[in-house]
């Protein structure tokens, strides 16, 4: 965190998503619901998998990833009201039409990019 900044862990509450992938269409400036204690940050090995990022205080973390036909979310779409339900619908419709699975992401592993507790530095 930035000097003097206190971030509560677990991170619980509503935050926005940043991302341009079509699966996120309709989210816009709406917020989704988070409950988590760990975060992953973007690095060279995982940058091609990042579907969305989110800010918590001064820290940015990966809030969803997509690789091949797998999508994972750090937030809870099922607890995110209409926005979350629409996101689930877009994911399912994308798989049905192969719009999502037709675009493979870079292969590789995430060595050196491990998860850490929210509020913790990489140092």
Image: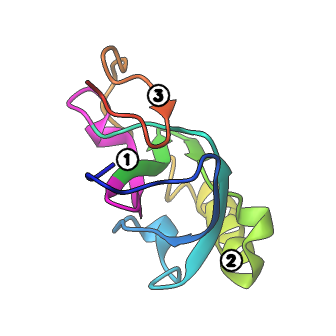
Res 96 seen here: no
Relative to 99, is 4 on the left or the right? left
Q: Residue 49 in magenta?
A: yes
- Secondary structure beneath dot 2 equals helix
Contact flag, marks 2 and 1 (Cβ < 8 Å): no
Q: Quadrant of residue 91?
A: bottom right
Relative to 27, is 83 on the left or the right? right
Residue position marked by numbered label 3 in the rendering: 115
- Secondary structure beneath dot 3 equals loop
Q: Residues within 10 Å of mark 3 (few under 14, many from 20)?
A: some
Considering only order in the chain, which callout, 3 or 1, is on the residue closer to the N terminus? 1
**In the image, which disc is placed on residue 86?**
2
Residue position marked by numbered label 1 in the rendering: 50
Q: Which residues are magenta?
A: 43-59
**In the image, which disc is placed on residue 31?**
none
For marks 3 and 2, give the one nearer the viewer. Answer: 3
**In this orientation, which residue lies closer to the viewer: 83 or 16?**
16
**In this orientation, which residue lies closer to the viewer: 80 or 14?**
14
Q: What residue do we see at 56% from left, 77% from top?
A: 31
Q: What residue do we see at 30% from left, 16% from top?
A: 112
Can you give x and y, in whole percent of width and height, for residue 53 in the image?
39, 57
- Secondary structure beneath dot 1 equals strand
Considering only order in the chain, which callout, 1 or 2, is on the residue closer to the N terminus? 1
């Amino acid at each position: 965190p930035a000097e003097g900044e206190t971030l509560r862990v677990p991170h619980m509450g509503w935050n926005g998503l940043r991302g341009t992938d079509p699966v996120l269409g309709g989210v816009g400036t709406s917020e989704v619901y988070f409950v988590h204690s760990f975060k992953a940050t973007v690095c060279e090995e995982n940058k091609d998998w990042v579907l969305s990022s989110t800010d918590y205080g001064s820290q940015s973390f990966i809030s969803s990833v997509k690789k091949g036909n797998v999508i994972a979310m750090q937030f809870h779409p099922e607890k995110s009201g209409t926005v979350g339900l629409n996101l689930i619908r877009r994911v399912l419709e994308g798989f049905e039409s192969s719009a999502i699975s037709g675009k493979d992401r870079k292969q590789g592993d995430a060595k050196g990019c491990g998860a850490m507790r929210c509020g913790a530095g990489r140092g």
